[in-house]
Amino acid sequence: SYQRQRQFLGDASHELRTPLSILRMDLETEVRDTDTHPKSKERAVSNLEEVERMSHLVDDLLVLSRMDEDYTKQHALVPIELGTFINNIVDRLSTLAQKQQVTLALDPSIAITEITVRSHEDLLSRVLTNLIKNAIIYNVPNGKVSVALTKDNREARIVVTDTGIGIPKEELDHIFERFYQLGIKDGTISG
């Protein structure tokens, strides 16, 4: 049953990528077209944002379907220098932070802390990107997100702190469940 479910997730997410790519190309063309009416262009931009959200969800489904023994065998652990790795992710998310009116900052210790770990690069990137992205999106205007790196003996710790809305104590047990999402509307949590 688990194998069939994993196979379905992989097949469905793979099949959804093509129509989403076609939609994205059509919408991008409409947005760039100088003959497009401003109202239509505005609607196309909004639809393009939804297509991007859907594409990220499909990518997440594909990763979930691959997160098993076969995937980890195919994708070997590689050495990753965490300071550079974190810096690259923060650079990629800086535009989102500006758009959300949030200051995204690296702790100065990252520049001087040399820590190399062996990990699955794409999975580590996805986890860290999602964590920082959520800290940005669910923050307050003029809020702050800070990313730090520490080392304790043989353990590396990446710490993301933010001035966001937080997670209610009663919801903390659920945050590692697949697809669990808090009811958040207009920056407030609704259960």
Image (cartoon, rainbow, N blue to C red):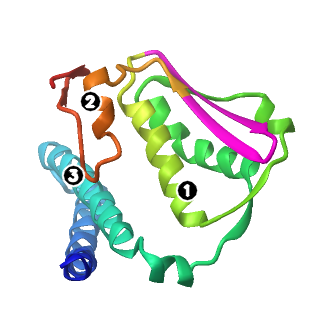
- Nearer to the camera, 164 or 92: 164
Give the numbered dot on residue 125: 1
The residue that mark 2 highlights is 171
Query: What's the CA distance linking mark 1 and mark 3?
Result: 23 Å
Work out which quarter of the rendered image holds the N terminus and state it: bottom left
- Residue 124 sits inside the magenta stretch: no
Q: Earlier in the sequence, mark 2 or mark 3?
A: 3
Judge whether 10 appears above or below 178 on screen. Answer: below
Secondary structure of the residue carrying numbered label 3: helix
Mark 1 or 3: in front is: 1
Left of 21 or right of it: where is 86? right
Q: Quadrant of residue 26?
A: bottom left
Circle 3 residue? 50
Number of other residues with Cα within 10 Å of mark 1, as a class: few under 14, some 14 to 19, many 20 or more: some
Q: Tell me the quarter of the picture where residue 146 sits.
A: top right
Disc 1 element: helix
Residue 48 coordinates in the image, percent (x, y): 24, 54
Q: Could you tell me which residue is drawn at 34 percent across and 62 percent down?
A: 60
Q: Are marks 1 and 2 in contact (CB under 8 Å)?
A: no
> Is 142 located above or below residue 104 in the figure?
above
Residue 170 seen anywhere in this rendered image of the structure: yes
Q: Position of residue 14 (x, y in %)?
A: 28, 79
Report the magenta residues as a range.
142-160
Asked whether, in this view, residue 102 is left or right of residue 39, the answer is right
Residue closer to the observer: 162 or 27: 162
**Magenta highlight: main SS:** strand
Tell me the residue at 59%/67% (across/down): 120
Q: Amino acid at mark 1?
A: Ser
Q: Relative to 86, does residue 13 appear above or below in the rendering?
A: below
